[in-house]
Amino acid sequence: MTEPFVTALAADVPVLVITAEAVVIVMPAGQGAVLLDPDVPREHVLLRLAEEEVREEIRTVIETDGTLTRLAPEMVGDADIHAACRVVALSTDLGEERGTARFRAALAAIRAAERRLGSSA
């Protein structure tokens, strides 16, 4: 895993951070209005796999099924969880779910426009 390096940020200038795991744009607080520009495409995160939530799930799974493992939840380390999350994130195909979400968002946008314009279809 490549750790990102941090350099001094210039005042009010967005910075692109690239690591082996992600590409992130760091926006200074004063730049929030840029995200509302209608010419700037926006994306919405539908799923986030948080390592802390995986840790909670490990505890629940182990406590629920005593036959699963002899390990105590505390014996599963941060590195184990991080590696497992990377494997799952890289090997999971959410193409069908993405298509369904896109379709549902399209329908919801159409319905919102209908309500806004006062028409009924």
Image (cartoon, rainbow, N blue to C red):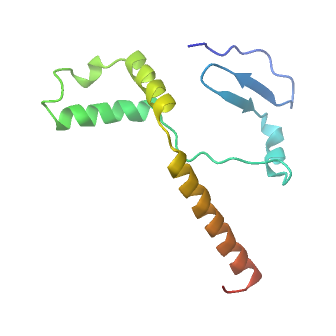
Would you identify the image quadrant in which residue 24 lies? top right
Give the left or right position of residue 35, taking residue 79 as reference.
Answer: right
Q: Residue at x 83, y 40 (%)?
A: 31
Is residue 104 placed above or below 14 in the rendered structure?
below
Give the left or right position of residue 31, taking residue 114 as reference.
Answer: right
Give the left or right position of residue 6, taking residue 20 as reference.
Answer: right
Q: Residue at x 49, y 39 (%)?
A: 93
Q: Quadrant of the C terminus?
A: bottom right
Number of marks in the rendered image: 0
Give the left or right position of residue 101, taking residue 82 as reference.
Answer: right
Q: Quadrant of the N terminus?
A: top right
Q: Residue at x 72, y 74 (%)?
A: 113
Is residue 25 placed above or below 20 in the rendered structure?
below
Would you identify the image quadrant in which residue 28 lies? top right
| Coordinates of residue 88 in the picture (x, y in percent) | 44, 30
Front in this rendered view, residue 60 or 111: 111
| Coordinates of residue 92 in the picture (x, y in percent) | 47, 36
Would you identify the image quadrant in which residue 67 lies? top left
Q: Residue at x 78, y 48 (%)?
A: 41
| Coordinates of residue 40 in the picture (x, y in percent) | 83, 47
